[in-house]
Amino acid sequence: MGKILVVEDDRDIRELIAFTLRFAGLEVETASSGMEGLEKARTFQPDLILLDVRMPKMTGFEVCERLKQDGQTAHIPVVFLSARGQEAEIREGMSLGAVDYILKPFSPDELPGRVRDILKRSKGAKSP
Amino acid sequence: MSAVVIDGHLVHYETLGRGRPVVFLHGWLGSWRYWMETMDEMSIHYRTYAFDFWGFGDSAKVAERYTVPHLVQQLEAFLDALGIWKCDLVGHALGGLVALGFGLRWPQRVGQVATVSLPFTEDAITPRLTKVNPTGVLDKVFRQRPLDYAALRAEAERADVQAIGRSIASLKGLDLRGQKPPARWLAIHGEKDDIVRPPEPGSLRQDASRFRLILFDQGRHFPMLEETSKFNRLLKDFLAGDDLASLQIKEEWRRRTH
């Protein structure tokens, strides 16, 4: 069972992602802002963080940078959540250390499989 | 009949009794109505509530809110509207998923959860539910039809078929066999249920101190309507807090009436 942290300011999207992943057997924690996301990344120690790019106050890119600078969270793979049409921005953000990105609106049918694939890939990349 | 308005849309509900709140949630084939006898029995000790999900019974047909996560939000909004902070949840099939989804989202708001005919995996749900009209499925469910079958059938007939299809479509990848119980959890199934296949007991990985599976050996999809007295007694023992390991299906008993 993988542990996933979802950082997303839009309540409907956050709840939909969390629900879909929980019912696919994953353990999920949520955060509604970048600051809350940073705190929960430290305490929850997820296997993967799904991070919205466009959030008020602290953007997903800023959160990602801080995660990668913190020894307690630097190892956690980050996946950006971004609206369609923002692909160029996302590619730029990938240079901050994210392992992948998921475009919104996503299909609930595909999300658990996509997350499991990324988890598998990230675990594979960690092993020697 | 009572109603609350949630986000500008009408939600129909019924309530009976006094005491600790217990909320009943219906499944894909109908509405609150098939909880009526059980609510009546439980209302001696509890304040019971049942409402119709979006697209079912007398609640509004709000097509963009038919996914299970939206129904979890409907339950949250319903409880908020009625001023209920914490309650026990009893959910049948779709309602069981909503109960569990709500419990996982808000564990502090749920005392106990009883699920009836809950699909543990996506493939446990018969494809007939989305291919055949709900009344067509319902007509084949009962070996012996309950007394008020005509009323139940009329409710099933009013369901928006999209509400059935979309809620099921939102369950891709569903796998609850290892799901950590958000609260004390009793799962009841009919062994002969061909609408939602019961789980293989050996495939479940829940912690036995928080979870119990009970099978009605002759039961089908609606144990609460097929063996009402036994079902009610079991539910009553569970809600009263009896040790999960000691729960069992007991012979019928009837409430004394004057």
Image (cartoon, coloured by chain):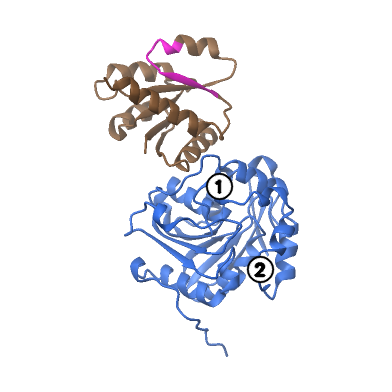
Chain colours: A brown, B blue
Q: What residue type is labelled 1?
A: Asp
Closer to the camera, B187 or B5? B187
Q: Report the disc number at residue B123.
A: 1
At a point 47% along the width and 52% down the height, the residue shown is B100
Closer to the camera, B68 or B16? B68
Q: Eyeballing the image, is B172 above or below A67?
A: below
Image coordinates of residue B245 in percent, x first then y, are: 34, 67
Image coordinates of residue B176 in percent, x first then y, are: 45, 48
At a point 31% along the width and 35% down the height, the residue shown is A44
Q: Quadrant of residue A126?
A: top left
The residue at which mark 2 appears reads as: B142
Image coordinates of residue A119 in percent, x first then y, are: 39, 28
Quadrant that contains the C terminus of chain B: bottom right
In the structure shown, which secondary structural element does the residue marked by tag 1 occupy? helix
Q: Which residue lies furthest to the left in this view?
A: A71
Q: Mark 1 lies on which chain?
A: B
At a point 39% along the width and 47% down the height, the residue shown is B178
Closer to the camera, A11 or B197? B197
Q: Which residue lies furthest to the bottom in this view?
A: B258
Q: Eyeballing the image, is B91 above or below A25?
A: below
Cα separation between marks 2 and 1? 22 Å
Residue B159 among magenta residues:
no
**Residue A8 seen in the figure:** no
- Circles 2, 1 touching at the beta carbon (< 8 Å): no
Residue A45 horizontal side relative to residue B15, left or right: left
**Residue A3 seen in the figure:** yes
Please give the range of residues in magenta.
Answer: A93-103
Disc 2 or 1, which lies upstream in sequence?
A: 1
